[in-house]
Amino acid sequence: MPVYEQTYRHYEAREALRQTRFWPITREALRLVLSRRAFVVLLMGAWLPFAGFSIYLYVLTQTQLGPMAQVLPVGGPLYLRFYAWQMPIAFVLTTFAASGLVANDRRTGALVVYLSRPLTRRDYVVGKLAVPLLLTLFVTAVPALLLYLVGLALVPSLLLTRAHAWLAPSVAVQGLLVSVTISLVALAVSALSKSARAAGLAFFGLLMMLDVVQGVLQEIYDKPYFALLSPQANLRLLGEAMLGGPAPALPWYLPALVLAATGAACLLVLRRQVRAVEIVT
Amino acid sequence: MSIPVEPIVSFEGLVVSYGLVRALDGVTGAFRPGATGLLGPNGAGKSTFLKTLLGFLDPDAGRIAAFGLDPTRDPLEVRRRVGYMPESDCHLPGMTAASFVAFAAELSGLPRAEAISRAHEVLYYVGLEEARYRTVDTYSTGMKQRVKLAQALVHDPALLLLDEPTNGLDPAGREEMLALIRDVATRRDISLILCSHLLHDVEEVCGEVVVFNQGRVARSGPLAELTGPRRSVFEVRVKGDPTAFLTDLRDAGGEWHDGEDGHRVSLPEGQGPELIFRTALLCGVQVRSLRPSAQSLEDVFLDALGHPPPAA
């Protein structure tokens, strides 16, 4: 069609900029991730441990199986064990969901599309970070809190005591810690690459390698401090401190400090890498 | 009496550096409403200027303002009023053109329903109505350029920044893109800054031009003034040894440059072609051809860069 016949309408109804202007970024990224059938299957599969633990809770409380109650009674350690199942699942999900979030934008030049709009770099990072955060919360804190509700329904007399008042907040905080840590690391690794595949391998490899290294060093030298090398081990230590696991090998503030430092390092990486202009000096 | 037009972009003593390298070295000037060409060789500072205007880079010194707003302080308000078509490829993998442009509109603050509606209108406007439900990854270079223009236009900016919009296009595609850009500037009342190293593109679309060279503004002004007949310039071809003829012309205040077929002679102020005939007569050469010449944009460009313009 010739240009002179084409129409163009001016847009007058401008509104004030919204505080939630990051949301379209999150929504579109989630839509792209969830359009992959394999990913949705994986996401649903991530709820199998919840089903297993619910059945276990039912059997434990509704039948008189004394030995089982001694192995894993209703309380903090049960939820700690649940998180031990969910953490690797959350890693795998995040690897698929988050590795391309920034890497693809850097590869295709889309960063400029975002940052030439009325958006700050913080809006962009928040919008992208919300994607793995929501997905990991969906497989950590959400099923853990539901599991708490299952326990509450089955043995209210036990969980509604003062001794267990800390349980629900601790379960929620542990889920949040796991999700925020995984999401931040995944997004920072994604920002360091222009290839989603390379970022995914680097993220998964980094977490696995650090966990193996700390395990090997602990085995050889028998020093608990090596646990600080691995984000998973730090999350486990904090979980134990909150949910009442075995006697803590390290004071809680040490893994908390390491995780805080990891988060700060990730934010620094994102601040450096998320730019509309690549400056090479 | 003509009413002075307020510039939409003004900059004064603007210095922008990448480490030790000064990309913009104290540039001063303004862009008025309408279509303005931003010319310059690679590394002249054109893209750096656009990025500073968008608030991507902070100036080391000086000031820049768009619509009276400082992009370093109010980048979001500036970007709301500006549409940017970058030089390099930019699309979101896996997205159709319709969803990509609607997404770009939403990022600019339009409500979702309005964003979708405008995306379709703008894709129609740039000639992608048939292909709007295809993923951008599958597009040809020309179609990708049109999508880039659509995403820059979708929020109805007051100023459009076009960075090499005809890059990679074949001649037909280039003419179509230029026609579209001309339409945006002339019929849609949207000002634009066309950043290009293709002089033809700028001549086709722009009324004014700013030439950057080595981080400075080398020339600026209305195209007609810069390229219109200046002091008398003639294409001259003579028979005989031209050495004495050209030397005498220079002694009389004229300038000349060699051409492929003769010489390009600029006469001093107030002088006409009779000076050429008189000098030729005195030097014993015969004038075989004499025709007036206007400066082309290429001449302005080369002149600004300190190179002698070639013969026409």
Image (cartoon, grey):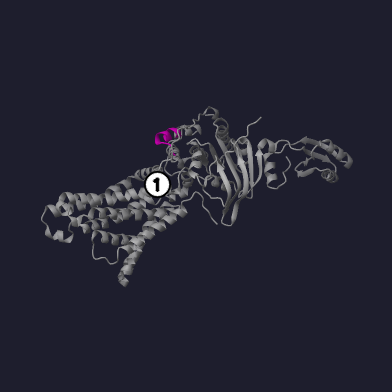
Name the residue located 16 percent from the left edge and 51 percent from the top edge.
A156
* Placement of the C terminus of chain B among the 4 image quadrants: top right
Q: Is B94 left, or right, of B54 in this rendering?
A: left
How many discs appear? Answer: 1
Circle 1 residue: A127
Q: Quick one: label 1, few (<14), some, or many (20+) residues within 10 Å?
A: many
**Residue A83 percent across, percent down from the top left:** 26, 56
Prevailing SS of the magenta stretch: helix
Q: Is residue B217 magenta?
A: no
Residue B168 seen in this snapshot: no
Q: Is B101 left, or right, of A142 in this rendering?
A: right
Subunit of label 1? A
Q: Is residue A66 above or below residue B218?
A: below
Q: Is residue B112 magenta?
A: yes
Q: Is A209 left, or right, of B274 in this rendering?
A: left
Residue most toward the top? Answer: A5
**Residue A138 percent across, percent down from the top left:** 29, 48
**Residue B214 percent across, percent down from the top left:** 64, 50
Name the residue located 63 percent from the left edge and 32 percent from the top edge.
B3
Q: Is B131 left, or right, of A83 in this rendering?
A: right
Report the front residue among B35 and B204: B35
Residue most toward the bottom? Answer: A221
Query: For numbered disc 1, what is the local secondary structure?
Result: helix
* Placement of the N terminus of chain B among the 4 image quadrants: top right
Name the residue type under label 1.
Gly
Report the front residue among B33 and B172: B33
Report the front residue among B274 and B5: B5
Residue B98 seen in this snapshot: yes
**Residue A271 percent across, percent down from the top left:** 45, 53
Name the residue located 34 percent from the left edge and 62 percent from the top edge.
A230
Give the magenta-colored segment's residue range.
B109-118
